[in-house]
Amino acid sequence: MGKLKIHVDQDKCQGHARCKSLAPELFELDEFGNAHEVGDGTVPEGLEDKAWLAQTNCPEIAIEVTEE
Amino acid sequence: MSDTDRVLPEHPPVTDWVHDFDHTDPRWTENPFPIWDELRAVSPVVHTDRFLGCYLPTTYEAVKQIAYDTEHFSSRRVVVRDERPEVQRNAAPPITSDPPEHKPAKQLLLPPFTPDAMKKLEPRVRAICNELIDEFIAAGRCDAAARYAKYIPVRAIAHMLGIPESDSDLFIHWIHQILELGIKDERQLKQAVEEMTAYFAGHIEARKAKPTDDLISTLMQAKDKTGQPLDDSHVLGSLRLLLIAGIDTTWSAIGSSLWHLARTPADRERLVREPGLMPTAVEELLRAYSPVTMAREVMKETSIAGCPIKAGKMVLLSFPAANRDPAVFPDADKVVIDRKENRHAAFGLGIHRCVGSNLARMEMTVALEEWLKRIPEFRLDPAGKVTWSEGTVRGPRQLPVLFGKQA
Ligand code: SF4
């Protein structure tokens, strides 16, 4: 399996903060509580499950997970 | 006949849910879940002539489509009622705002409600929970809705707004008039809104003389995008919203959760044994017993999931019904406290996502944790009766429970 990469679509994100609570290592919130991925979104080894978990819990389907 | 003694529509008992539903019918209030299942099996959108014409989307997909479609569906009316009085400017922004006014109004309120801001508030909420439990634990029983769940959010939001927590009963009274009695009685609604507005106007005046660092002051100091301070009517509208939206929503969510745990010993024991399950349990309880159903007004004719939607009618935007859709949630009718995939819509979808969702999650978590720490064993009191609220927000209003193991 290749490396995973995550990306938050800013047009879709409504700041539910589910991603941040499920995968605090992978997401950051801005002052309005909207999320963006940490760094360039590359998911460090061992955190793949958390990336998928965040993706499947985002109510706005704003998180894209791609496999490189 | 004068305006004040107008006769409001009758609400005869419902005999045909599919074509004549009524969300204030006692059967709906008591147990709406089988009704939603029945309606969903027939159509993704159903209609009633009651409430001057109202649609109800029954599936997650239909709810989502409407929530995202701000062109055809307006938020200027957010409660389905017997009447459609004139729309008030700045009724309760941003919940009653449409684009383009919506975004700037909402952005003002977002920073004070981020997860980090909620962490700072958490110790106060823990203390409130324990102060409440102290009042009744020795009795070995209590009404968990009226003595516990009800006071946690009201005192927390009062703390944030910088208004006396001791005014809680007054706030609760207004909310009851606005969200329940007001559905069928315009006068009660108006009276409560007027009293509430006067109350906040007094606080605004006081802060003009002596600024503080609470949420009222934050709003008063906020500037709109042209650099102008908000006018008083906007500040008042947002304060009304925070009080109305902040109270019986979370009160209901905490109450429903305790109701579930009182009658489901397996889940209760598991949560006591495995406190690490609390985050998924809270999400699942939110999904299964979502308290809030918002409304929209249809502005332009359209169709949703193949069903024609006519302008001028209302939509009961039932996030709770969406959350019970088996097409999206396997075992939708079961409460699975360790459910992993849970894209529930309890806080809405799209631009009107509940501003207070982080506050509500924190309050629910803390309320359940503190209760379970001190009252790990409890059950419904067989001699009492559980009653449920009517209308926009669903939750137990009376929840008599006995503490300790069953003898
Ligand atoms: S869960 Fe989705 S909507 Fe919520 S903050 Fe994360 S990306 Fe945004």
Image (cartoon, coloured by chain):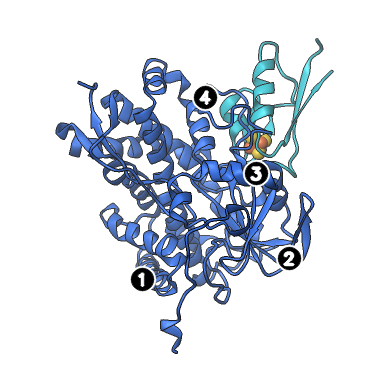
Chain colours: A cyan, B blue
**Who is closer to the viewer here, B304 or B282?**
B304
Look at discs 1 and 4 and give the one toward the viewer.
4
Label count reads: 4
| Residue type, label 4 | Val
Q: Which mark is residue B40?
A: 3
Q: Are marks 4 and 3 in contact (CB under 8 Å)?
A: no
- Which residue does the numbered mark 1 point to in the structure image? B195
Where residue B14 appears, x then y in whole percent? 51, 57
Q: Chain of mark 4?
A: B
Label 2 sits on what residue type? Lys
Q: Pointer 4: residues within 10 angstroms few (<14), some, or many (20+)?
A: some
Residue B250 image offset from top left, x and y in percent? 43, 44
The chain identifier of the residue carrying mark 2 reads B
Return the x and y of residue B380 as percentages of the image width and height: 29, 33
| Residue B246 position (above or below residue B183) | above
Q: Which residue is mark 2?
A: B310
